[in-house]
Image (cartoon, rainbow, N blue to C red):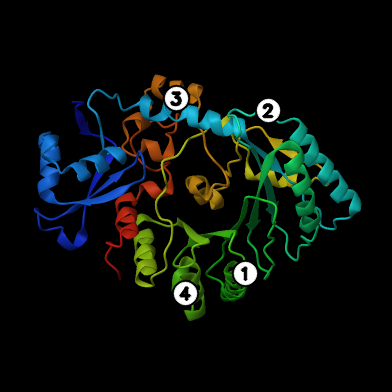
């Protein structure tokens, strides 16, 4: 029988309500898989003693499935990173990202050039990596303007059906809208396999901004209820104690959206660790559900990243379509939350052989960190402090508790 051990990437987290009871249940959280389970103390003691054959078989299988137990001879360093390379390679072979241009006054010439650009990209597609698997083209549109005209997307949608049949491809549409202020109509393309709208909202301490946000989100919530295939992701930029200024309407719409299956809330708190915890408890008390935990991810070398500024500059070139050779990663601080949540499926992050070799050749302290599978490490890191670590790393145990509904409320 194969022998197993407790993975070094498994965190044990005490439940605050039973913190003084040494015989109480605990949470196990795997940074390898992002999975959480609640386990009784007797079973946890069995794991610590290594007598795994005494565990109930269903629990044993779950622990293995969540990679909380791993083969005893597994070397948990570069292995955990390099095993994802084949997944990344398969994804890269079968996915192409096109950055669509934005035109403030779209005309027939713009639309024609857009159609020609997408058709040209289809003709350049590599051979399918797997038989009978369609290639997916992600159409990415980045907006930072207000009162925008998106009527041209209707013409694009009609063109996608013809291209899909001609070149055997699937299209996915993703819109990133920075600091929206208008009750815009979220575009819904019928001939795509995905319609994802990503909103990044800041300045949420200003009364006028809060009022505008409420109006916009109310409008979007009605659209979500009438368009089942539309997916909405909202990133709230939290600064200071802005949530203390939120009125009942703001809280109600966030509660409403967080309960919808098509909507996902994310929060990027630019706060101290203590203030961040206070905000998390506030959200818990208000029953506003957010995606607090980053899933296990693939990292990317800095020289492979496409910055936000480059994205915006490219998207403002009328009539041009940029083929992104690597998945886009937003680097700007205010969008770091999107970087940390690849589950939004907008920007995937990949490890590379070169990055892995460099990470372990430099003696980087990240290779010993329990959270390495979540952030991928930083080859420039020289000490054990978390000053330059992702925001989620500071309060990760509390994020696990909050996601499990076990974090004490205010």
Tag 1: Cα neighbours inside 10 Å, few (<14), some, or many (≥20)?
some
Residue linked to disc 1: 223
In the rendered image, the quadrant that contains the N terminus is: top left
Estimate the spatial distance between the alpha carbons at disc 1 and disc 3, rounded to whole Å.
44 Å
Distance in Å between CA atoms under marks 1 and 2? 37 Å
Which callout, 3 or 2, points at the residue further toward the start of the chain? 2
The reply to whether dot 2 and dot 4 touch (C-beta < 8 Å) is no
Q: Residue furthest right?
A: 109
Residue 229 lies, in percent from the top left, at 59, 59
Camera-nearest label, 4 or 1: 1
Residue 181 location in percent, x, y? 66, 68
In the picture, residue 8 is in which quadrant? top left
Mark 4, residues whose alpha carbon is within 10 Å: few (<14), some, or many (≥20)? some
Residue indicated by mark 4: 251
Looking at this rendering, what residue extends furthest in the bottom direction? Answer: 248
209 left or right, relative to 104: left
Q: Secondary structure at mark 2?
A: loop
**Up-down: is 217 above or below 43?**
below
First in sequence: mark 4 vs mark 1: 1
Residue 151: percent from left, percent from top: 79, 61
Front-lying residue, 174 or 274: 174
Determine which of the numbered discs, if any, sits on residue 385 in the image: none
Task: Decide: is 359 above or below 297.
Answer: above
Residue 148 makes an appearance in the image = yes
Q: Earlier in the sequence, mark 1 or mark 2?
A: 2
Q: Where is mark 2, residue-wise?
A: 126
């Amino acid at each position: 029988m194969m022998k197993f051990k407790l993975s070094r990437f498994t965190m044990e987290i005490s439940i605050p309500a039973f913190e003084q009871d040494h015989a109480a249940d605990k949470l196990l959280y795997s940074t390898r898989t992002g999975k959480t389970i609640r386990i009784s103390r007797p079973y946890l003691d069995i794991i610590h003693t290594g007598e795994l054959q005494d565990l109930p078989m269903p629990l044993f299988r779950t622990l293995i499935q969540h990679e909380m137990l791993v083969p005893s001879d597994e070397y948990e360093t570069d292995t955990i990173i390099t095993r994802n390379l084949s997944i990344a390679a398969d994804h890269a072979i079968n996915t192409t990202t096109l950055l669509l241009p934005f035109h403030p006054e779209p005309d027939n010439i713009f639309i024609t050039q857009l159609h020609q650009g997408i058709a040209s990209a289809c003709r350049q597609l590599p051979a399918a990596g797997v038989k009978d698997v369609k290639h997916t083209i992600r159409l990415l549109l980045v907006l930072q303007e207000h009162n925008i005209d998106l009527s041209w997307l209707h013409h694009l949608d009609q063109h996608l059906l013809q291209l899909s049949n001609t070149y055997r491809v699937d299209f996915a549409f993703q819109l990133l809208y920075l600091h929206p202020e208008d009750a815009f109509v979220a575009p819904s393309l019928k001939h795509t396999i995905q319609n994802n709208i990503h909103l990044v909202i800041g300045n949420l301490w200003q009364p006028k901004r809060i009022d505008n946000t409420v109006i916009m989100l109310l409008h979007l919530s009605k659209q979500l209820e009438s368009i089942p295939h539309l997916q909405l992701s909202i990133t709230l930029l939290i600064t200071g104690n802005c949530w203390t200024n939120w009125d009942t309407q703001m809280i109600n719409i966030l509660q409403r959206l967080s309960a919808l299956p098509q909507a996902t809330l994310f929060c990027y708190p630019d706060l101290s660790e203590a203030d961040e915890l206070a905000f998390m408890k506030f959200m818990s008390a208000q029953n506003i559900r957010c995606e607090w935990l980053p899933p296990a991810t693939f990292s990317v070398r800095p020289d492979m990243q496409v910055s936000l500024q480059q994205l915006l500059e490219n998207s403002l070139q009328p009539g041009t379509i940029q083929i992104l050779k690597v998945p886009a990663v937003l680097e700007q601080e205010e969008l770091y939350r999107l970087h940390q949540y690849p589950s939004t499926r907008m920007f995937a992050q990949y490890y590379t052989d070169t990055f892995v070799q460099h990470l372990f050749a430099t003696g980087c302290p990240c290779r010993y960190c329990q959270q390495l599978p979540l952030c991928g490490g930083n080859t420039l890191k020289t000490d054990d402090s978390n000053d330059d670590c992702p925001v989620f790393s500071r309060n990760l145990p509390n994020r696990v508790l909050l996601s499990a509904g076990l974090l004490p409320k205010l």
